[in-house]
Every structure is written in C-alpha cells, then in structure tokens.
Amino acid sequence: MVQNNRSPESSETPSTIVDNNVTEMARLIDLHAILARTREVLFPGHNDTTDIRYVLDIACGPGGWALDVAFEHPKVEVIGIDMNPAMIKYASALAHSQGLQNAHFRTTDVLKHLDFPDNTFDVVNAHCMSSSIPASAWPALLQDCMRILRPGGVLYLLEAETPITNSGICERVGALLAQVKHQADGYALTNDESPVAITPLLGPFLRQAGYRNIQHKAYAIDYAKGAEAYEGCYDNFTVELQLLKSFLLEAEVLTEEEFDKLYRDFTIAMLVDGFCGIWYWLSIWGVKPASA
C-alpha cells in the first residue's frame, strides 16, 4: 500500500496529497475486487465460522475486506484500522450507507501499540503490510497481534510477490521498485536486491512469534491480455507506478524525463497483443496456542 502521510517538509502541495489519497483509494478498491474474485473464502482454512465473533482488519484501507466480512457475517463485529484518515472516513461512510452496524473503523498507527485489550479478537487480518511497515517492525506487530487474539484465535496474512511477465520493460519496472525498496531505510527484508519481497519469510515470522498450526494457500492471478483480470491489473499497476513517481525521483533512481519515458513504455508494453503476466499471492495463517 502506498502511504500518503507526508512530512511537513514534503514538496507536495495539500491538493496533491488529496488527489493522491483519492487515486490510491480507487486503486485499492479495484485491487480488492481482483482479490475477491481470486480468493474463494474470507477465512481460508476455517470450515466452521460460527466461533468467529470479533474480527480486526489491520491496514484496512477503504474497508473492502472488513465490509465483506460484516455483510456476509452479520453477527460478527468487525473493526478496521488504518494510518490514513481519508481511508477510514471513506470506509465508515460506506458502512453507514450499507447499513452495516457491525462494521467500525478508526485511524490507528499500526506501528505503535495496538490499543485493544488482551484476548479480544477471534481473527486478526492483515493484507499487504510489507510495503507499509519497516522490516524491524514485523516481530513487535506479530507479537501484538498474538496478545489481542484470544487463545485459539487466528492471524491471517496476505502478501504478493513482484509479478512475472514476458515484457522486458515490465520486468525492469519490477526490478526498479525492488531497488527502491532496498534503498528505503529499514524496509528491505532481504540482504540483496532480489525482487522477492516477503512470502518466503511469512512462515518463519509466524513460527518465531509463537503461532501454531501454520497453513497457507497460494493464488495466481493471470493478467495476460484478454484474461479476466487484465484490465483491473493494468489499471492497478499503471496507477501505482504514477503514485510512486515522487518516491522514485526523491530516491534519485530516475530523472523526471526518464520516469516519463519509463511510464509511457510500461503502459504501451501492457497493451501489446501477446502480453502475458502472472501475479503470485500467498495467504498464510497461524493459531494462537491456548497457553500463550
């Protein structure tokens, strides 16, 4: 998730920040729609959901997953938290407009202590956290999730890898974003500039934090030209790259002229007949032991 909380020294104007919030919100809504078509169920591996009463969605964005849970499970109380107030305002308005009185949203800095009592939730869910929290924050966050889960409660994580395509320019963009992530202070999860971001590390993270009965399910989104997910992924990737422009320029990886050419070539590459792409996601979950 692209974070739009800029420091006072940022060169972005207030109107730019608002525009970025709106654009990122639209991108996340479309991304949720893509993932919702790909994933069969809201709670993988949970054959019986009658024991689920209280759910927390961390980094909920505009509320897609949390609102789906609230709609499909009206007896479940769902809380969504996010660092971006604009996302929370939108999610709250949508819950109100849909009459979902069991969905609640609040602005929270997930890098700080999660302000909930011990043993509160049956399920804690977190999507796409690797791009929004430093590598050093993972152990504390997973421990805090363990604290607020009830014994037997489940933590769900969902992360993606850099897409694989048959386009040289698209592969260059993926490598470039991996390079920027390694240059970003504290965000690199590996010791080199490998495009592998997070999925191989999720299992070890959960085991080190003390979770048990760890399971996973992989998803592959085919976004070759003509595939069902093609248009959604095209919009997602082109918008995300444009949103990352300021970060790429600040990192001095590209000049503005170089970025504009790269963006133009990238969009054209995905429009060419014969374009193929696949995007791997991993859902992984672990259980808080009764003795924790």
Image (spheres, rainbow, N blue to C red):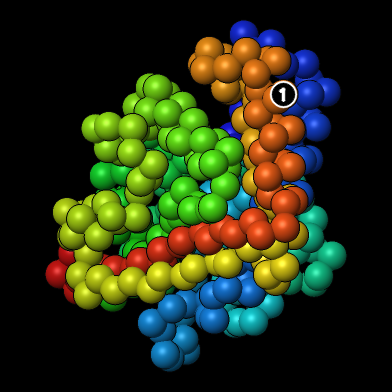
Is 10 rendered above or below residue 137?
above
What residue is disc 1 on? 260
Q: In this view, does 132 lie above or below 148?
A: above
Give percent across and percent down for residue 229: 67, 66
Which residue is painted at 51% across and 59% down in the image? 279
Spot the residue most to the front: 274
Q: What residue type is labelled 1?
A: Asp
The residue sitting at 47% across, 48% down in the picture is 162
Quadrant of residue 225 in the image?
bottom right
Between 174 and 80, the one lying in front of the other is 174
Frontmost residue, 119 versus 35: 35
Q: Check the image and report above or below for 238 versus 119.
A: above
Q: Please give left or right for residue 18 compared with residue 152 in the image.
A: right
The residue shown at (59%, 59%) is: 276
Quadrant containing the N terminus is: top right
Look at the image and tell me whether residue 103 can be seen.
no
> Residue at 54% of width from left, 41% of height from top?
168
* Callout 1: SS: helix
261 left or right, relative to 283: right
Quadrant of the drawing holding the C terminus: bottom left
Residue 99 image offset from top left, x and y in percent: 80, 72
